[in-house]
Image (cartoon, rainbow, N blue to C red):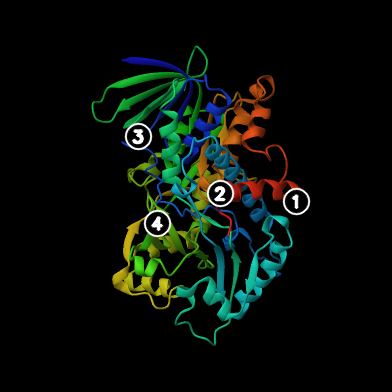
Amino acid sequence: MTVKTVDVLLVGAGAMSSTLAMLLKQLDPSLKICVIERLKSVAKESTDGWNNAGTGHAAYCELNYTPEDAQGNVDISKALTINSSFELSLQFWSYLVKQAVLPEPKSFINRTPHLSFVWGEKNVAFLKKRHALMSAHHLFQGMQYSEDPEQLKQWMPLVMKGRDASEPVAATYIPHGSDVDFGSLARYMMAHLVEHENFELILNHDVEDLQRSSQGGWSVLVEDRESGKTTRIRSKFVFLGAGGGALPLLQKSDIPESEGYGGFPVSGQWLVCEDTQVADQHHAKVYGKAAIGAPPMSVPHLDTRVINGKKALLFGPFAGFTTKFLKKGSILDLPSSIRGNNLKPMMAVGMNNMDLTKYLISEVFQSNRSRMASLRDYFPQAKDGNWRLADAGQRVQIIKKDEKGGGKLEFGTEIVAAKDGSIASLLGASPGASTAVHAMLDVIERCFADRLDKDQWREKLKVMIPSYGESLIDDAALLSRVRQDTLSTLQLNP
């Protein structure tokens, strides 16, 4: 058996691991880093362009980030947090472009206006209230609002063409929104990293076991999926960034912090149009309101996408239920994740979310006629022959203990780390890749705290991410400076 010794071992070669690896290499080029990926290529699971929404989730258009309560109050706090987190990603990518680590920005990010679109008097009233609150904050300065059909035709002609003129409609518009091909972005970062010493990318290998090493850190057993040969990797620090595959690995670590966590898998599908005559008539991401009972990642949207350099329109995603944790996973993933310490939370979530489960199962059996009818809510003149059905990626939502000892289902992402900082895992989904920089900074602060001050890592992070350590939510002048630079560098200016 081959034995390797490294400083940092990252499991999964998607958005999270590529971001953490790049941050750490910029902070300390001497770190010996190894990345293990179970597939034969990089970023082909949740990070791949065809598997995620690619919106560059900035909370400009996603209505589920601004919920309305029974009294009609709209809460924009989550939108502020997500927007400020995405700004960190833009700053880091801008730094990498300036350093020629990343190529021409258009190869992974493209300016695509973000719109929220609703119809019906009640929804129009909600959107107007939302706009008033958001546009008053500097993070969302410049957000436009209109109920004028002629204005909406200019913003989104395909959406308005053939629509009932008597129906009340409204939209908000942000011109500097973006479409991000996270798959290409991760592959560009990995391609740069593998050219440097002290970095190794090992593809087509499974992590079979991980346990604390008597020498400190972790001992991780990996197996070649073709030859069956095994390698033991000893590492001071391990990060589990394997998307839906992170939870089973976290459970194998047996750290106390992992107790009580479970996963609720959700699948998805897109309707895809690659006809350039149609796709060229729409240049925007148009988000609507989710159906009652739908999970947040199933908010319907008609998206302009540029994936691997090719433009297409995607509509969906249509959610569904599966027991797989990965798109290329096993139907045994969910039952295999059940443990004594998470059984109660998982049962509680199952009992309390029957409506969600029924909704997801109904989505699985939805007909193409039904899917096309949903599309025509956003594109009234859509033709069946221009659209094909494609599978999206898997999402595993977090199940955890609640304050009462039961369980709760959370739609978001969370870092779970050992008390000694020797291992960390990212669980959950949306907004996911868009806030990878924010999430990986959290990992660094929790697991490399001693180096932040001792080795001047804070100062180095400030160079890469000018707003690091400060609040973009509170500081309008700081936001203005960094946003002006990132929009210019990444060619996102209108």
Does label 1 or label 3 sit earlier along the sequence? 3
Q: Quadrant of the N terminus?
A: top left
- As drawn, the label of residue 268 is 4
Depicted 329 relative to depicted 204: above or below: below
Depicted 312 relative to depicted 475: above or below: below
Q: Secondary structure at mark 1?
A: helix
The residues bearing labels 3 and 4 have C-alpha atoms spaced at a distance of 22 Å
Give yes or no for contact between labels 1 and 3 (Cβ–Cβ under 8 Å): no
Left or right of residue 472, residue 370 in this image: left
Looking at the picture, which amino acid does disc 4 mark? Gly
Image position, residue 216 (x, y; %) = 52, 15
Q: Secondary structure at mark 4?
A: strand
Does label 2 or label 3 sit earlier along the sequence? 3
Disc number lying in front (2 or 3): 3
Between 254 and 244, the one lying in front of the other is 244
Q: Quadrant of residue 400?
A: top right
Is residue 318 visible from the viewing direction of this image? yes
Classify mark 4: residues with Cα within 10 Å, few (<14), some (14-19) or many (20+). many
Q: Secondary structure at mark 3?
A: loop
Does label 2 or label 4 sit earlier along the sequence? 4
Image position, residue 45 (x, y; %) = 38, 44
Residue under numbered circle 2:
412
Q: Quadrant of residue 95?
A: top right
Looking at the picture, which amino acid does disc 3 mark? Arg
Residue under numbered circle 3:
38
Looking at the picture, which amino acid does disc 1 mark? Ala
The single residue placed furthest to the bottom in the displayed view is 166
The single residue placed furthest to the left in the displayed view is 227
Residue under numbered circle 1:
476
The residues bearing labels 1 and 3 have C-alpha atoms spaced at a distance of 43 Å
Q: Quadrant of residue 403?
A: top right
